[in-house]
Image: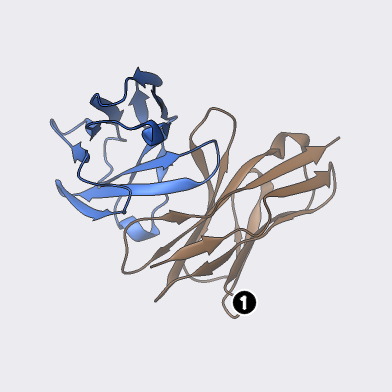
Chain colours: A blue, B brown
């Protein structure tokens, strides 16, 4: 069964540095998302992406965050000037077709630790 | 904006007993409701969804959920729990004017032998 893959599985960075989290969505999917989960609990929406542009974003997704689909297969989340509170598990997800009726397929996440 | 509430942080049941994990939602327009399960150190896995039609939907691993429009609820159920069902369960909702999916805070299900 096709999977969403995320790399790296764990990223450690110093406060103020930039990080890029990488994702390869399922190949025929059209909608892409980033979510984060802090302390293994609440799953928070960051951003959705369709047709090479952001569809929606949450208040968490401030101007330090950006997303890109540089080559038709990868989907990246960049965080500039990282803060301690950015430490979380970041999940990429994708869905096909009519986005609002389709379930999301999640990767296994990247654990970001900001020190 | 749409939102989901899972009133129980923790649900404990004995193996073989029925289980219920509760979820209520708020959305403008038609609700599209989902349940996901998360095992340790893994991403969320889709269990089942309600889009339209029968109020009782069946999903993976013997789980089912009942959509109740008047109570704005979408409770997850299973007739006979297994120890391997122990995990974190998330309810999620989309509205037909929104593409993003919003998740509840999660309910940790523990099934004891």
The residue located at (37%, 18%) in the rendering is A12
Coordinates of residue B66 in the picture (x, y in percent): 63, 66
The residue located at (13%, 30%) in the rendering is A71
Coordinates of residue B27 in the picture (x, y in percent): 44, 71
Q: Decide if residue A36 is on the left or right side of residue A23.
A: right
Q: Decide if residue B111 is on the left or right side of residue B88.
A: right
The residue located at (75%, 40%) in the rendering is B110
Q: Residues within 10 Å of mark 1 (few under 14, many from 20)?
A: few
Q: Is residue B27 above or below residue B102?
A: below
Q: Decide if residue A52 is on the left or right side of residue B2.
A: left
Give whichever of A88, B107 is nearer the camera: A88
User: Looking at the rendering, in which quadrant would you find the N terminus of chain A?
Assistant: top left
Q: Callout 1: residue from which chain? A: B
Give whichever of A114, B20 is nearer the camera: A114
Residue B65 image-quadrant placement:
bottom right
Q: Is residue B40 above or below residue B60?
A: above
Can see residue B74?
A: yes
Coordinates of residue B20 in the picture (x, y in percent): 73, 56
Residue at numbered disc 1:
B71
Can see residue A3?
A: no
- Count of marks overlaid on the render: 1
Residue B58 image-quadrant placement:
bottom right
Q: Decide if residue A22 is on the left or right side of residue B1.
A: left
Coordinates of residue A3 in the picture (x, y in percent): 39, 31
């Amino acid at each position: 069964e096709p999977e969403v893959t995320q790399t790296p599985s764990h990223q450690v960075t110093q406060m103020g540095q930039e990080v890029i989290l990488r994702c390869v969505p399922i190949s025929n999917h059209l909608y892409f998302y980033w979510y984060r989960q802090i302390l293994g609990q609440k799953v928070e929406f960051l951003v959705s992406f369709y047709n090479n542009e952001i569809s929606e974003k949450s208040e968490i997704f401030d101007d330090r965050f950006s997303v890109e689909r540089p080559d038709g297969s990868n989907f990246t989340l960049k965080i500039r000037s990282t803060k301690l509170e950015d430490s979380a598990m970041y999940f990429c997800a994708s869905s096909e077709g009519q986005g609002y009726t389709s379930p999301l397929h999640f990767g296994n996440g990247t654990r970001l630790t900001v020190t | 904006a749409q939102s989901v509430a899972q009133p129980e942080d923790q649900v404990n049941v004995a193996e073989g007993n029925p289980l219920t994990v509760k979820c209520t939602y708020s959305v403008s327009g038609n609700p599209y409701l989902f349940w996901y399960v998360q095992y340790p150190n893994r991403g969320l896995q889709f269990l089942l969804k309600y889009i339209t039609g029968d109020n009782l939907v069946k999903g993976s691993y013997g789980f089912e959920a009942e959509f109740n429009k008047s109570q704005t609820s979408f409770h997850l159920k299973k007739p006979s729990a297994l120890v391997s069902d122990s995990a974190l369960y998330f309810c999620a909702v989309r509205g037909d004017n929104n593409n993003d999916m919003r998740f509840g805070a999660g309910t940790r299900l523990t099934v004891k032998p």
